[in-house]
Image (tube, rainbow, N blue to C red):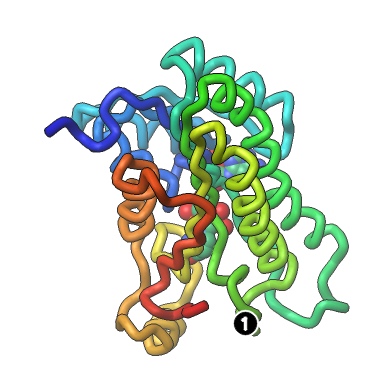
């Protein structure tokens, strides 16, 4: 049997580290040619070398996904090097404010959160989806968060609102592009122990977070990557418009 993504071209935004790097690694193992993306060229090169050591075929591209012109240039670069993009994982994003009362949230933090998550996802898809529609094929996976699934005091409101917006964008788009043979799904992870989170979240707090999950551990980047591989593969051929909680049972909607 050939690997699940053999012959496919995948762009994974935000794959210079964290969840995106794990998705890129697994997609390459599954036979995809992967475009690694981020802004930190040294980090991208390290992920690229790691995947190439495992026999994977990758290129690396850099762009700020809040800027449409840069995304368009990146798309053209990928198409020139690998061919049309079959799979898009719009993963780049992050949280730009602290949790707290709305009136203490800065306008700048609000705008950065919306721009860096919701608008970045919109602009990335806006660049990639016309080619998919023309070819009547493609798969798009967006990345929300448990923060966007239910109100929680630990979640910054701007990040939660941006991620909830990504869910509606996903579902609305799924209805638009389903007739073109394009599937659009969304993954909403709870706390994932990326390199950054391992450094950022004190050990005692990590343990407290474990305790609120029915499955008594925090998530790993590979937990998210395995869900993404399923959604990107033909095994999910009749699945679109869903939000998958990769959350150890910490979110049940
Ligand atoms: N980790 C979690 O617990 C968790 C939980 C729920 C949802 N998520 C979501 O999952 C996604 C990945 O999170 P992560 O924890 O793996 O993040 P991370 O380790 O901080 O990595 C973020 C990635 O996104 C890229 N990126 C961010 N903003 C960008 C921009 N404007 N232009 C280009 N690249 C940009 C970064 O690139 P450079 O560093 O190269 O600039 C990096 O590759 C995010 O959307 C996040 O909101 C994470």
Q: Is residue 199 left or right of residue 110?
A: left
In depth, the one of 246 and 61 nearer the eye is 246
Outermost residue toward the front in this view = 179
Label 1 sits on a secondary structure element that is loop
In this rendering, the answer to whether 184 lies above or below 163 is: above
Which quarter of the picture shows residue 76? top right
Of residues 96 and 58, which is closer to you in this image? 58
Write down the quadrant of residue 120 in the picture. top right
Q: How many marks?
A: 1
Residue at the outermost top position: 80
- Residue at the spot of label 1: 152
Residue 42 seen in this snapshot: no
Q: Is residue 248 visible?
A: yes
- Residue at x 82%, y 72% (from the top left corner): 105
Percent x, y for residue 98?
Answer: 69, 72
Give the percent coordinates (x, y) of residue 124.
Answer: 63, 36
Specify few, some or many for label 1: CA neighbours under 10 Å numbering under 14, 14-19, or 20 or more. Answer: few
Is the N terminus in the top left, top right, bottom left or bottom right quadrant? top left
Name of the residue lying farthest toward the left: 1
Counting from the top left corner in percent of width and height, residue 203 is at 40, 79
Q: Please give the name of the residue rendered at 49% of the width and 34% of the height, measured from the top-left corner.
A: 181
Q: Position of residue 215 (x, y in %)?
A: 31, 81
Q: Residue at x 48, y 78 (%)?
A: 251
């Amino acid at each position: 049997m050939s690997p699940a993504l053999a012959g496919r071209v995948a762009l994974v935004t935000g794959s210079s580290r964290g969840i995106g790097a794990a998705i890129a690694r697994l997609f390459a193992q599954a036979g995809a040619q992967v475009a690694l993306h981020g802004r930190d060229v040294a980090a991208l090169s390290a992920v690229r070398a790691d995947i190439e050591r495992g026999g994977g075929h990758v290129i690396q591209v850099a762009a700020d996904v809040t800027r449409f012109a840069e995304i368009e240039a990146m798309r053209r670069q990928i198409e020139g090097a690998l061919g049309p993009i079959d799979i898009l994982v719009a993963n780049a994003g992050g949280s730009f404010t602290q949790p707290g009362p709305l009136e203490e949230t800065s306008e700048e933090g609000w705008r950065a959160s919306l721009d860096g998550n919701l608008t970045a996802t919109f602009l990335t898809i806006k660049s990639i989806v016309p080619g998919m529609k023309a070819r009547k094929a493609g798969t798009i996976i967006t990345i929300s968060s448990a923060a966007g699934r239910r109100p929680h005091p630990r979640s910054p409101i701007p990040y939660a609102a941006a991620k909830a917006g990504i869910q509606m964008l996903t579902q609305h788009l799924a209805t638009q592009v389903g007739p073109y043979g394009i599937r659009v799904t969304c993954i909403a992870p709870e706390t994932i122990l990326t390199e950054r989170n391992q450094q950022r979240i004190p050990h005692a707090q990590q343990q407290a977070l474990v305790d609120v999950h029915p499955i008594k551990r925090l998530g790993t980047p590979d937990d998210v990557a395995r869900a993404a591989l399923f959604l990107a593969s033909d095994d999910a051929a009749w699945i679109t418009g869903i939000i998958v909680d990769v959350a150890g049972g910490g979110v049940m909607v």
